[in-house]
Image: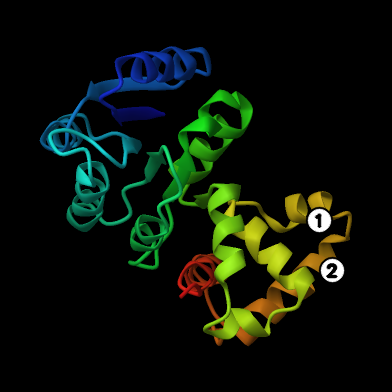
Amino acid sequence: MRVVIAEDNVLLSAGLELLLGTKGIEVAAVVTDGPGLMAAVECEQPDVVIADVRLPPSFRDEGIRAALELRRAHPGLPVLVLSQYVEKVYARELLSDGSGGVGYLLKDRVSRVGEFVDGLRRVAAGGTVMDPEVITQLMAEAGRNGVASLTHREREVLGLMAQGLGNSEIGKRLFVTDNAVHKHVGNIFAKLGLPVADGGHRRVLAVLAFLNSGP
């Protein structure tokens, strides 16, 4: 797996490069701004992009804007966005095209090496990974759409889906059987009015509905 990193913090970018190298992941390029990210992706054709939300010169949303532009230019390009704080608008916008291969993690998650690398691999494989803290904050706001009709257990399942977990992994987290998880997931899809076909895409749509449920 080849990665392009967009991060202006030298210590963090160097740490990421070293960390990923120990896991057999090649860092094809490290850049510090949006234009550099665009150019590196065109040149290196990476399997996945890691980008900070805030990059020079204004340190507002240059990173996420570049990531979104890349997703438009290269549909399906896996992108994992890192942020210092929970910025719910950006989390929602990242999923706005309804496809997978996206992740939104807080930078603190990098220190949890196993979780971070696992999340990166999920994103590179086309999955959707959201930071548990983002999910917690969004869950506290949920209530405008079909998400409000979900039971407590169904919300737990949906929250774990947003972290990129499959049914078996969700079952282990909640200490329930795979069949029970399958039933909960089916109920979630039905209550959110999602199409019958394309289960993988429906999982992304369910997470998107979850992210859009706040005020």
Query: What is the secondary structure assignment of the residue under circle 1?
Result: helix
From the viewer's side, name the closer residue of 202 and 149: 149
Disc tally is 2
Residues 166 and 112: in front is 112
Give the number of the disc on residue 67. Answer: none
What residue appears at the point 39 percent right and 61 percent down from the top-left corner?
95
Res 117 quadrant in image: top right
Left or right of 33 in this view: 53: right
19 to 37, vertically: above or below: above
Give the residue number, with chain letter if any, for mark 1. 171
Q: Residue at x 78, y 69 (%)?
A: 153
Q: Residue at x 23, y 35 (%)?
A: 45
The quadrant of the rendering that contains the N terminus is top left
Q: Earlier in the sequence, mark 2 or mark 1?
A: 1
Q: Camera-side residue: 45 or 31?
A: 31
From the viewer's perspective, is residue 204 above or below residue 84?
below
The colouring scheme, among rainbow, by chain, secondary structure or one colour, is rainbow
Check disc 2 and give the amino acid type: Ala
Q: Is residue 77 left or right of residue 107?
A: left
For the residues labelled 2 and 1, say whether their Cβ atoms are less than 8 Å apart: yes
Residue 171, position in %: x, y? 81, 56
Report the residue at 53% width, 53% height from top.
134
Residue 120 position within the rendered picture, expressed as x and y whole percent measured from the top left: 49, 37
Mark 1 Cα shell of 10 Å, populated few (<14), some (14-19), many (≥20) = some
10 Å neighbourhood of mark 2: few (<14), some, or many (≥20)? few
Estimate the x, y position of residue 123 in percent, counting from the top left.
47, 45
Q: x%, y% of residue 104?
A: 45, 47
Residue 210 lies in what quarter of the image? bottom right
Q: Which mark is residue 180?
A: 2
Q: Name the secondary structure under disc 2.
A: helix
Residue 41 versus residue 155 in the image, above or below: above
Marks 2 and 1 sit apart, C-alpha to C-alpha, by: 8 Å
